[in-house]
Structure formats: structure tokens, C-alpha cells
Image (cartoon, rainbow, N blue to C red):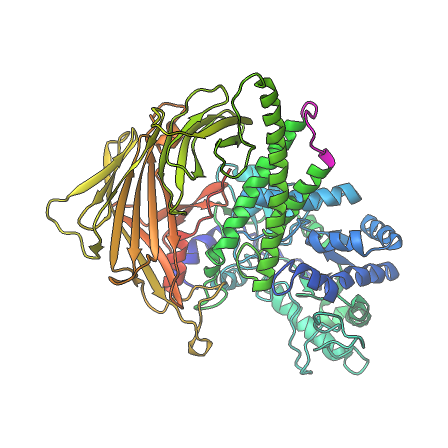
């Protein structure tokens, strides 16, 4: 155990009561479950056809036939699909009865088991609400316990969210391997987690960390070369085998081997019991894609449990089928005081030496960006539709159709929060499935929003019928008579922002809904060389619209100005000299940002409010990562494994400054070598020329940067390093899922130093667009 875990273990041991374990046999709670990834290697429909539907069909039948059996169901997507498209009325009635008796229990209950590192709090709430809403509407129940066994590390946001959602206990598994080992030795796997510094004890939750065996049943048997306790074998794709014989089916329990099976189970239980304070042990029975044939599973486990209980005094163990709630309620009845874990998380996660699971922070960035845009669109669409319907509908939009479109996107955005979806760790065909679902859902919501705007547009046109002016339809292609643009603010407060439109003519007039000129700026587009970017300064009250008319003109307009572009010569990468600098600036009422003409790199930022200048350096670097499985650990969608320290990834940089009345933009283009025709990296930095008055303060204090990366060479991990002379005492603060800031002091790692420390320093969620 490294010294970095000592403060944590001190916390965990502080409240541990000595001698808390009761006398008597170990009480084992056997919790049957199936870990059913919504989309990892196979698509949702492939999984439903191969095994997922059979899990619920066979489990319901087996729980109904024997009252002592139990099962927990976790994620809702597969269950909802089974419920609506497979289950008969008889099976639905049986599910109601099993829930009422406590033989079947829904735990977690979200649409998916969401990732905890790269998801946003809003989306975590959405997918949890989506699943819980179905359970409450269908069964009148609300899950009380979490089962978050597979996300790659544990955020402090999650226990706070689950406590706020009314959960009574929280269960996790994937935490750093050496920390888990230390916690096992200290019997510290169970504690009270206060994830939020601001809420502290107001929102705390009892937390159970699964031991080193995690959520799967130990599969190795000393008396057989087959796996253990998986009597239904391994799921087969694309269809179940017609003869019912699956690969790797465990050896059936018989009178000849039942003692051997009992010995294996009891030995594993006693090994685990040494890691916990109480004699109550949770023994998860199941793993990925299990219980698709619950009949053969229970037919073998039933006699095994009966056999162990018949020798309970001799073996020192009693066993029983249980739900997760059964286990936590029994633990609660012991009335033990637990250690408190304050305001920390379990990120980054490493499963073993040289296996830092930090690669997924950036894997499949296009999917990550699309998921975030879809979430923002859904929020805006729901807000716009609600405002349209209240107090009464005032247009031709069909509410039933609109709700269907919104529900489709809610499902897609919830689905993609899965820990093998937004993380980018799914197979290519599953990635395509997620993106297709998002794209289809976004298209439907855009149609809703266009219909609402069109209704408002037509009402406005009717009111202006006496005028001879002609507007184009919202969202239409450019026409000689121009554009109309409607901007909606889904937030509850006024927002001052820059709205960017792509247009195809260099001179325009921009007017608002009252016909008044609006400040705007035209500049060359960075996406389409034949087009222009039109930047409009927009002040939008909360839950309100602004409507703009953009008309081509032949003459310059006072309110709409053309930006000028100044391009600087290419500069070779070199260390900045101590000679007098030739600096160029972009500034507003809040900041002055300076760039060095001799390097084409950022030099410093001066903040007016504090009258402080912070020197800065910029550089793009690359880690050379191993991609050969025969040469040791590799970097992939999950893990980041660097061979050496990062090296500069560019030789020259070109800079241009686009100056306008509304904004100034500095564009930097980094080329891999002196002969490269296309840049590999780009940074666009922007300052808005607004005042520091209260209504424009947030925009004034924003230095906006956009980055472009690629294409990269094979087996390269790229980073942008921005350095300053700020002495942070080896302490940083990172965003925690858009909920709170997480204090992160420097940690000294023994193994895989580059991968763990580097990505710990840069870990944060993507900004959430509104």
C-alpha cells in the first residue's frame, strides 16, 4: 500500500468500532443478477434477440415456481423493451405479484447504468428519471438501492445524486486496485459517503464497495476445467442455439460433486468475510449476460444451498437467496456506526499496474459531442414545447406527435449515458447505433421547434400583412430576400451571448422583431471558405425568443460591420527569447490577451479587476503509445498507456487576428513540419467587446477557445499544454459532472505514473451547452 492512501484509511478507521463482528455462522446473501450492457459489443436488438429477452422470460417463470428464489433487475432499457414487445399479460401479472412479495427487486432503476467520469449531472438525472418514471407509472414503486458495479471509477457526484433521489444505500465496484486492496485489509469497504462538500451530512449515503471479485461469481473451480456456478453457459449471438447447449456450461450439481461445490463456495465466502466488519456477506451470483436460462441456473443452485444449510454448523456458513434490499436491511438492523468518507471520489481508476482507465476520457469525441448537443437540444425543445402549450396551445402543432418526438430523444439521450456508450468503449457498430438513435431523435425535436417558430412567424406575418416586406421561412436556404432567424433561451434568466450564423453574402442588414438595427459582425468563415460567419449580439430574456431578419444589401450598414483579418508569417517552434517582445493584443473591459509575434503563441493575460498579469505558454504535444499487444500494455479506448514523456508535435505555427467591433478572434494553426500543407492542430481564441456591466458581465469575463485536432499519426495521444507561473501548491480543482468542483491535491503514484497523474490533472467533464 502506497502512502497516498493513508489519509483515506485514517478516515475509514476513525469510526470503526472494535470487535463489531457477531458470533455465529457467516450469513451469506446470494443475490442472483445479470449484468446486461445496453450497448457494448452488440446492439440493443442483437442482445434482445440473443439473450436479454430470455433473461426476463425465464427469471419470471422460475421465481414464480419457487417462492424462496430471488432476483434483482437493474437497467430498464432491456426490461422496458421486453415489457412492451415480448411479455404476455400473464407474465405481466406475474411480475406485479413478484414485486409485491419482494421476490423480484428493481435496483438502480435508471434507463442505463451511467458512466460517472464523462457524463453531465443533467443527463444523469434524465436517464434516472426516465427509468424511474416507467417503474412508478407501471408498478407504483421507486428503487431504494443503487447497483453501480461497472462504471470505470466512481465520482462524488453519484452518491450525492442518489441520496437526493431517495436511495437508502449505494453499491460500487471499480475503484483503484491498490486502494481496494488496502480497504480490504482494513475492513473498510463499507462506509458513509458524503460526496458533496456543500451538502455534507445533509445528503450522505451508506456505500458498499464490492471486493476484488467484483460483481461476478468466482468462475474457477479446483475440481473442474469448466467455469463455476454458470450452469447456463455463455450467451451465443446472433441467435440462441437450437439444441439449447451453450459454450462453457458449468458441470451440473450431482450427489457426486455437491460436496466439492459446497467447499468451493464456502471457501470463497470465508475469504471475503475477512474483508468486512460484519458476518453478513453479499455474494453476487451472476455476471455479464447471465440467467438467459434461469431454469438450469436455479435447478443447480437450489440443491447446493440446501446442502450447505444442512451442514451450517459444521461449515460455519448459512446461505439464502436475497435481493440487494434484503442484504442492506439486514446490515442496517445490526445498528453499527460506520466510518465517514468526506468529499472525495475514486477517479482515476486503475485495474492493475500499468492499467490506468483514462483513455475513455477522450475516446470517440464525435459521439461525446453529439450526445452533449442532443442533450442541450432536448432541454431546449422540452422547454419550448411547454411554453407553447401553456396556458393553452396556440397553433397547429399536434401535441401527441410532439410528445412522441420528445420521448424518442429522451430515450436516445438516456441510452447514450451508458458506461460503454458515451465513454467511447463500444464496438463500431454499437457506436453507429447510438449516433443513429441520437440523430433521429434530434431531427424530430428540430421539427417540433421549427413548427413552433413557424406558428409564431405566421402570426407575426399576419400582424404585418399591411407591410410590403417579405421574409423567408425560418430555417430555409439562402434566398435573395434573406433569412429570418429565431433564437430561443431555455434558461430562466436573461442571457447575453453571441449568435453565429453562416451566410453567403458579405453585406447584410440585421434587424430585430421591432425593425431596429442589431449590432452584428461579418467575417470569413472557418468552416466554408466560400461563406461568411455572421455574429449577432443577442440579449434574450429567460424562456423567451428573439427574432432577427437578415437581408442582403449593396451598401455598408452602420450596425453591421466587416471584420478585418491580419495574417502573420509562419514561425518555427523555438524557445521564447528574453529580448524585448513584439506583442499584439486583443482586449475588452475585462481582459487583455497578448500574443508574441516572434513565436505566434500566447504570451500573457492581464485581468483588469485584479490588475494582475499571468504569463502563459502554449504547446501541443504527443505521447507515443504502445499499440502492439505483444509489446506490453497498450493504449486503447479504455486505457492510456504512454511509453515516454510527451514530445512537441509541431514545427511551425501560423497566426491571424480577426478584428471587429463585436469580437476579436486570434486563430493559431500548428503544422507538424515545415513542408506540411495542412495544419494538425488549431486554437481559436475569442473575446467579445462588451462592457463589464451586470447584464454583459458573464460574456465579458469569458475567454472562449475552440480547438481542432487531427488527423493524428498512428498510436499517438495528443495534448494541449497551457502553462503559467501560478504556484498552485500542487493543487487543482476540476469539474465534477457539472455539479461541483472537486479538490484534487497531487498524488504520488508508484505505477504507471504518466498515465495516472497526467490524466488526473486534466480530468473534467465536457462543458454542457444550454
- Percent position of residue 644, x then y: 33, 68
Q: Is residue 606 visible?
A: no
Q: Is residue 512 above or below residue 64?
A: above
In the image, residue 758 lies at what x, y percent? Answer: 37, 57
Q: Position of residue 720 (x, y in %)?
A: 34, 54
- Is residue 51 or residue 731 the one in the foreground? 51
Q: Nearer the viewer, residue 581 or 348?
A: 581
Residue in the picture at 86% in, 62% down: 66
Quadrant (top left, top right, bottom left, bottom right) of the N terminus: bottom left
Location of residue 353 by image quarter:
bottom left
Residues in magenta? 390-400
> What residue is drawn where x is 69% and y is 49%?
109
Q: Is residue 187 above or below residue 534?
A: below
- The verdict on residue 394 being magenta is yes
Residue 420 in the image: x percent, y percent?
A: 57, 58
Q: Is residue 392 visible?
A: yes
State whether residue 452 is above or below residue 359. Answer: above
Residue placed most toward the observer, 460 or 66: 460
| Residue at x-position 61% and y-position 69% | 271
Whether residue 314 is in magenta: the answer is: no
Give whichever of 690, 91 is nearer the camera.
690
Q: Is 223 rendered above or below residue 658?
A: below
Q: Main secondary structure of the magenta part?
A: loop
Amino acid at each position: 500500500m502506497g502512502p497516498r492512501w493513508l489519509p483515506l484509511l485514517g478516515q475509514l478507521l476513525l469510526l470503526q468500532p472494535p470487535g463489531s463482528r457477531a458470533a455465529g455462522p457467516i450469513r451469506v446473501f446470494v443475490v442472483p443478477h445479470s449484468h446486461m450492457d445496453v450497448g457494448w459489443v452488440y446492439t440493443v436488438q442483437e442482445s434482445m434477440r440473443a439473450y436479454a429477452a430470455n433473461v426476463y422470460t425465464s427469471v419470471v417463470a422460475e421465481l414464480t415456481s419457487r417462492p424462496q428464489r430471488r432476483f434483482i433487475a437493474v437497467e430498464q432499457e432491456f426490461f422496458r423493451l421486453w415489457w412492451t414487445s415480448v411479455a404476455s399479460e400473464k407474465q405481466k401479472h406475474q411480475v406485479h405479484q413478484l414485486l409485491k412479495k419482494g421476490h423480484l427487486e428493481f435496483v438502480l432503476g435508471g434507463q442505463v447504468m451511467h458512466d460517472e467520469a464523462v457524463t453531465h449531472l443533467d443527463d444523469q438525472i434524465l436517464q434516472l428519471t426516465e427509468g424511474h418514471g416507467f417503474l412508478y407509472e407501471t408498478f407504483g414503486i421507486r428503487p431504494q438501492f443503487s447497483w453501480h458495479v461497472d462504471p470505470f471509477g466512481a465520482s462524488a457526484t453519484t452518491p450525492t445524486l442518489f441520496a437526493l433521489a431517495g436511495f437508502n444505500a449505494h453499491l460500487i465496484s471499480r475503484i483503484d486496485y491498490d486502494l481496494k486492496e488496502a480497504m480490504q485489509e482494513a475492513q473498510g469497504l463499507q462506509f458513509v459517503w458524503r460526496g458533496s462538500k456543500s451538502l455534507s451530512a445533509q445528503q450522505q449515503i451508506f456505500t458498499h464497495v464490492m471486493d476484488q471479485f467484483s460483481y461476478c461469481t468466482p468462475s474457477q473451480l479446483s475440481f473442474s476445467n469448466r467455469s463455476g456456478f454458470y450452469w447456463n453457459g455463455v450467451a451465443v449471438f446472433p441467435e440462441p442455439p437450437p439444441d439449447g447447449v451453450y459454450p462453457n456450461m458449468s458441470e451440473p450439481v450431482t450427489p457426486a460433486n455437491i460436496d466439492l461445490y459446497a467447499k468451493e463456495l464456502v471457501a470463497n465466502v470465508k475469504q471475503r468475510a475477512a474483508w468486512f466488519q460484519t458476518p453478513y456477506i453479499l455474494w453476487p451470483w451472476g455476471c455479464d449476460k447471465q440467467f438467459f436460462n434461469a431454469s438450469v441456473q436455479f435447478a443447480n443452485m437450489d440443491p447446493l444451498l440446501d446442502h450447505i444449510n444442512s451442514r451450517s454448523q459444521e461449515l460455519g456458513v448459512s446461505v439464502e437467496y436475497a435481493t440487494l434490499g434484503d442484504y442492506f436491511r439486514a446490515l442496517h438492523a445490526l445498528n453499527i456506526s460506520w466510518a465517514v468518507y468526506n468529499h472525495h471520489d475514486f477517479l482515476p481508476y486503475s485495474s492493475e499496474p500499468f492499467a490506468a482507465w483514462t483513455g475513455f476520457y477522450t475516446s470517440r469525441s464525435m459521439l461525446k459531442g453529439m450526445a452533449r448537443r442532443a442533450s442541450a437540444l432536448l432541454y431546449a425543445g422540452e422547454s419550448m414545447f411547454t411554453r407553447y402549450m401553456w396556458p393553452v396551445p396556440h397553433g397547429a402543432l399536434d401535441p401527441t406527435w410532439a410528445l412522441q418526438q420528445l420521448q424518442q430523444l429522451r430515450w436516445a439521450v438516456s441510452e447514450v449515458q451508458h458506461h460503454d456508450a458515451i465513454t467511447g468503449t463500444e464496438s463500431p457498430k454499437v457506436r453507429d447505433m447510438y449516433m443513429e438513435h441520437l440523430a433521429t431523435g434530434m431531427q424530430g425535436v428540430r421539427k417540433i421547434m421549427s413548427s413552433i417558430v413557424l406558428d409564431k412567424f405566421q402570426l407575426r406575418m399576419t400582424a404585418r400583412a399591411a407591410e410590403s416586406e417579405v421574409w423567408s421561412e425560418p430555417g430555409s436556404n439562402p434566398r435573395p430576400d434573406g433569412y429570418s432567424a429565431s433564437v430561443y433561451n431555455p434558461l430562466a434568466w436573461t442571457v447575453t451571448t453571441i449568435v453565429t450564423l453562416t451566410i453567403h453574402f458579405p453585406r447584410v442588414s440585421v434587424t430585430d422583431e421591432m425593425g431596429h438595427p442589431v449590432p452584428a459582425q461579418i467575417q470569413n468563415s472557418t468552416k466554408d471558405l466560400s461563406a461568411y460567419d455572421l455574429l449577432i449580439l443577442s440579449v434574450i430574456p429567460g424562456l423567451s425568443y428573439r427574432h432577427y431578419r437578415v437581408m442582403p444589401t449593396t451598401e455598408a450598414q452602420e450596425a453591421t460591420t466587416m471584420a478585418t483579418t491580419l495574417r502573420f508569417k509562419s514561425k518555427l517552434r523555438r524557445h521564447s527569447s528574453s529580448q524585448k517582445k513584439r506583442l499584439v493584443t486583443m482586449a475588452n473591459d475585462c481582459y487583455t490577451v497578448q500574443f508574441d509575434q516572434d513565436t505566434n503563441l500566447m504570451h500573457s493575460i492581464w485581468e483588469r479587476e485584479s490588475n494582475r498579469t499571468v504569463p502563459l505558454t502554449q504547446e501541443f504535444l504527443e505521447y507515443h503509445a504502445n499499440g502492439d499487444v505483444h509489446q506490453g500494455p497498450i493504449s486503447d479506448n479504455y486505457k492510456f498507456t504512454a511509453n515516454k514523456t510527451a514530445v512537441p508535435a509541431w514545427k511551425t505555427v501560423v497566426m491571424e487576428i480577426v478584428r471587429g467591433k463585436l469580437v476579436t478572434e486570434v486563430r493559431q494553426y500548428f503544422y507538424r513540419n515545415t513542408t506540411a500543407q495542412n495544419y494538425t492542430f488549431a486554437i481559436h481564441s475569442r473575446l467579445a467587446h462588451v462592457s463589464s456591466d451586470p447584464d454583459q458581465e458573464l460574456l465579458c469575463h469569458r475567454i472562449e477557445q475552440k480547438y481542432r485536432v487531427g488527423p493524428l499519426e498512428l498510436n499517438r495521444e495528443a495534448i494541449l499544454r497551457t502553462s503559467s507561473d501560478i504556484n498552485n501548491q500542487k493543487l487543482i480543482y476540476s469539474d465534477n459532472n457539472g455539479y461541483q468542483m472537486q479538490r484534487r491535491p497531487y498524488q504520488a503514484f508508484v505505477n504507471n505514473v504518466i498515465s495516472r497523474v497526467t490524466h488526473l490533472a486534466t480530468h473534467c467533464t465536457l462543458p454542457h451547452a444550454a
